[in-house]
Image (cartoon, grey):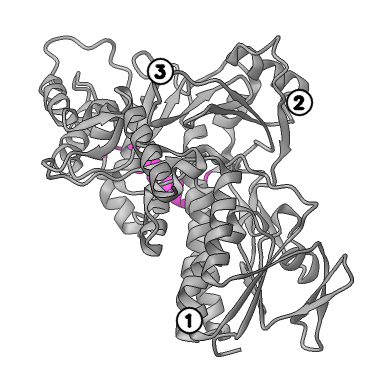
């Protein structure tokens, strides 16, 4: 196939299916391409991935969808970054904040990197990332990352949201745009003589044909896995976690603007603020703890041991397929692969998978060469994000359970790319230059790597700091910057009232 297909069927709805449908509908329906989503009425949505990177804002901006339209409908909140608690036991490094970039960082990031290098040389200076980035200050004070008009600096931010409600919102927008929708349960694919998929068969007795198919069927991978038998590359040797528990808890008057990832005995727990609740979960390895024990640990942490709040138990398959685009099928979302949600990359990888393929569709280039180039691009996204997540486990300093000791000692988890990053850091050389040499800064920028490694306290042990606090002037600068931002819940309440008024 060397031209844009005229009929595309997306198998599966949920966030991945409807995000892809809306994106493709916006770009292709006006060119006469027919797009249909087949969503099963009997298969539930995973629906626990409730955090995003700033890429989700770019997605909505590209479609002309205002925050006041979708955020109140999805109980969404703003996200300035991720706080990591308890991953390091080194004194003074029990928590750190992984920031989303702002223009203010252009002023503070060089200072942060210079002070990190000084700390590596043994200088007593505070080199934790928290004090160097505006997003950390906004998060600490529960301020929305939406500045007043007189603040001349742009702030990047992501979102927290109810994943089920987001899928429903995208569904409505896609159908309104002209995407066709059919409620049916796809059972299997019907192949043609060339080995491509000609149609999909449904439990209702129909066969639905198309030129091209998008597999958004989740971990079942109906098309990319079962029909085309695309091999799967497991990340089990790199990342031990294979299970998760999710459950809600109450939220108070203050709404934070950060996800919190807290180290647990056999994994880590997430805490995500929505307008109406906290979303909580525990990502763990079933090789080290049973599901019942993990649930007890999470309930204990949340103060819900005596509560009848239901917990959802999930199994995770970490890794990726060897071909995200195979023959006339594109796999998007869980069908193509999954990384544990430590850095909220699931929706980002879904978005990038669909968006990059759309570039090939719009050019009408579906050649074998284009397919090879595309697949390598998406492999790089998955593998590079895997490495950044692995770095959290390799730099942890916990020794309280076999789980944490095994993670720190796991040599199989370190790719050549990550080995070079660690070696550069240990030797005190220019990490920014190494990131550029590997051409991986577009996956995670230099500031993210510095924040992770410095935030974990990966420095020579030189004892407690003495003398003046050399970073103190930054505190006043950040305080004055923060005066240009408003209380998070107040901003969200005003947006909800605006949305209510516009719907009347």
Observer-nearest residue: 1 or 160?
160
Mark in the foreground, 3 or 1: 1
- What is the C-alpha distance between the residues marked 3 and 1? 53 Å
From what the image shows, is residue 324 above or below residue 94? Answer: below
Observer-nearest residue: 464 or 455?
455
Mark identifier at residue 291? 2
Is 270 magenta? The answer is no
Q: Badge 1: how crowded within 10 Å, few (<14), some, or many (20+)?
A: few
Residue at image mark 1: 30
Observer-nearest residue: 318 or 407?
318
> What's drawn in magenta, residue-wise?
414-428
Observer-nearest residue: 151 or 243?
151
On the picture, is 381 further left or further right than 17? left
Q: Is residue 290 visible?
A: no
Per the image, label 1 sits on a secondary structure element best described as helix
- What is the C-alpha distance between the residues marked 1 and 2? 49 Å
- What is the C-alpha distance between the residues marked 3 and 2? 27 Å
Mark identifier at residue 94? 3
x 45%, y 41%: residue: 72
Q: Badge 3: how crowded within 10 Å, few (<14), some, or many (20+)?
A: some
């Amino acid at each position: 196939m060397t031209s844009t297909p005229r009929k595309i069927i997306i198998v599966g709805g949920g966030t991945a299916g409807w995000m892809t449908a809306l994106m493709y509908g916006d770009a292709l329906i006006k060119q006469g391409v027919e797009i249909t989503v087949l969503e099963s009425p009997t298969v539930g949505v995973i629906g626990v991935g409730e955090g995003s990177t700033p890429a989700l804002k770019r997605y909505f901006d590209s479609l002309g969808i205002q925050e006041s339209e979708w955020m109140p409908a999805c109980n969404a909140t703003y996200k300035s970054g991720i706080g990591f608690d308890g991953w390091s036991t080194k004194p003074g490094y029990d928590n750190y904040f992984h920031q989303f970039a702002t223009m203010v960082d252009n002023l503070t990031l060089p200072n942060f990197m210079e002070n990190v290098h000084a700390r590596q040389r043994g200088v007593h200076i505070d080199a934790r990332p928290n004090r160097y980035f505006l997003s950390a200050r906004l998060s600490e004070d529960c301020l929305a990352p939406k500045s007043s008009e007189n603040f001349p600096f742009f702030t990047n931010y992501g979102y927290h949201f109810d994943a089920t409600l987001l899928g429903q919102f995208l569904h409505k927008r896609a159908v309104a745009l002209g995407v066709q929708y059919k409620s049916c349960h796809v059972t299997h694919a019907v192949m043609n003589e060339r080995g491509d998929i000609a149609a999909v068969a449904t439990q209702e007795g129909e066969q639905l044909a198309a030129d091209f198919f998008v597999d958004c069927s989740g971990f079942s991978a109906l098309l990319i896995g079962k029909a085309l038998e695309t091999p799967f590359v497991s990340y089990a040797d790199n990342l031990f976690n294979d299970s998760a528990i999710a459950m809600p808890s109450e939220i108070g008057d203050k709404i934070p603007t950060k996800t919190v990832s807290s180290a647990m005995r056999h994994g880590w727990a997430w805490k995500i603020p929505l307008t109406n609740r906290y979303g909580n979960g525990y990502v763990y390895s079933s090789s080290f703890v049973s599901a019942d024990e993990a649930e007890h640990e999470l309930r204990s942490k949340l103060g819900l041991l005596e509560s009848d709040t239901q917990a959802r138990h999930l199994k995770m398959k970490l890794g990726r397929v060897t071909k995200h685009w195979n023959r006339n099928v594109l796999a998007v979302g869980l069908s193509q692969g999954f990384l544990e949600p430590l850095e909220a990359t699931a929706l980002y990888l879904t978005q990038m998978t669909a968006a990059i393929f759309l570039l090939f569709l719009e050019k009408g280039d579906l050649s074998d060469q284009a397919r090879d180039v595309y697949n390598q691009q998406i492999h790089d996204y998955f593998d590079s994000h895997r490495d950044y997540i692995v770095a959290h486990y390799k730099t942890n300093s916990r020794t309280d359970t076999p789980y944490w000791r095994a993670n720190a000692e796991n040599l199989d988890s370190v790719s050549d790319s990550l080995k070079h990053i660690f070696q550069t850091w240990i030797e005190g050389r220019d990490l920014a230059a190494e990131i550029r040499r590997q051409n991986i800064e577009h996956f995670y920028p230099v500031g993210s790597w510095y924040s992770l490694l410095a935030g974990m306290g990966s420095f020579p042990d030189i004892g407690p700091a003495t003398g003046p606090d050399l970073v103190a002037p930054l505190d006043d600068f950040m305080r004055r910057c923060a005066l240009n931002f408003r209380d998070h819940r107040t901003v969200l309440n005003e947006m909800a009232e605006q949305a209510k008024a516009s719907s009347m």
